Amino acid sequence: MIRTSALLLTILALSAPDAVLAQKGARGTAAEGRVLFHSPALSTNGLACINCHSDFDEQREPDGLMRAGHPLYNATQRATFWGQQENDPDRYQSIGDAAVVCVEHFMKNPDKLTARQVESLSEYLKFKSPRPLTDALALTAAADKTGQYLGHDGGDRIRGRELFYSACHVCHPNANGGIGVPIPRDKDPAFYARKVREGDGLGAVLSGLDANAFALSAGNFMPFFGADRLSKSELRDIIAYLRSLPAQ
């Protein structure tokens, strides 16, 4: 009876999600990767992976937030990252390589990641990929190739308030400084549209607007929102809300 109870307890323990996550790879573990993914400990600016990338199916389990980055659920076997084509010489070879660049660039951590941290993050995201996607990510960067960003006025500030708190508040709390800088209230709509669509410059590069707009050494770390992450109508509403706020 004692042996049966002990065996039952062992089976229950091993069937728990944490027990599955804790299965060791060569060095890192999925359990460690889960902590790293949800913690700002990897950054120097307070940003965490979960702020820009969900680790769950956003369609089936929406949490009310709109993230600039695509979900990493089911993403570990994707053919390319950042929407680059497979034959691009500078494409990221794996999700671990992409994570290192994110930590260095967006999280402003010059120490990057240790080999164990890279493996742990990779193991966690593999665990979160029950049906791995192998197709290349669709390119949805939407910077205005004219550079003028016309047609971003006339939005609904009431809808814009809700959208702002879904998409922008985490980095610009109440449009003030946080992870990001304070957002001015008195700029033309084109100013805000450019910031959102081009971000740190990568949005301009991937849209074919300016091949030299993105540089890791420039110090900018705002991610861009592509058309599939934030529509033009939604962006207009956010801009209307920002322009309705009292001057600082």
Image (cartoon, rainbow, N blue to C red):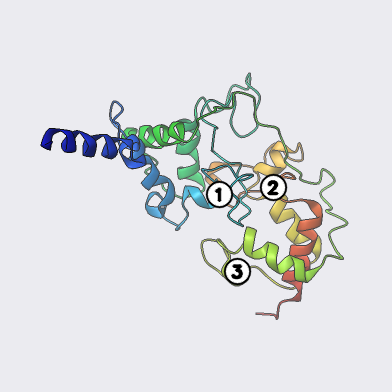
Q: Which numbered marker is on residue 182?
A: 3
**Label 3 – label 2 distance at C-alpha:** 22 Å
Q: Along the polypeptide, which appears first: circle 3 or circle 2?
A: 3
Q: Along the polypeptide, which appears first: circle 1 or circle 3?
A: 1
Most distant residue in the top direction:
87
- Quarter of the image containing the N terminus? top left
Q: Mark 3: which secondary structure?
A: loop
**Label 1 – label 2 distance at C-alpha:** 11 Å
Quadrant of the image occupied by residue 212: top right
Of the pair 193 and 55, the residue shown nearer to us: 55
Q: Tell me which residue sits at (71%, 43%) in the image.
A: 204
| Amino acid of disc 3 | Pro
Of the pair 246 and 170, the residue shown nearer to us: 170
Mark 2 lies on residue: 229
| Amino acid of disc 1 | Cys
Q: Which numbered marker is on residue 52?
A: 1
Q: Mark 2: which secondary structure?
A: loop
Q: Which numbered disc, 1 or 3, marks the residue closer to the eye?
A: 1
Q: Tell me which residue sits at (60%, 69%) in the image.
A: 182
Residue 124 in picture, x, y percent from top left:
41, 36
Q: Which numbered marker is on residue 71?
A: none
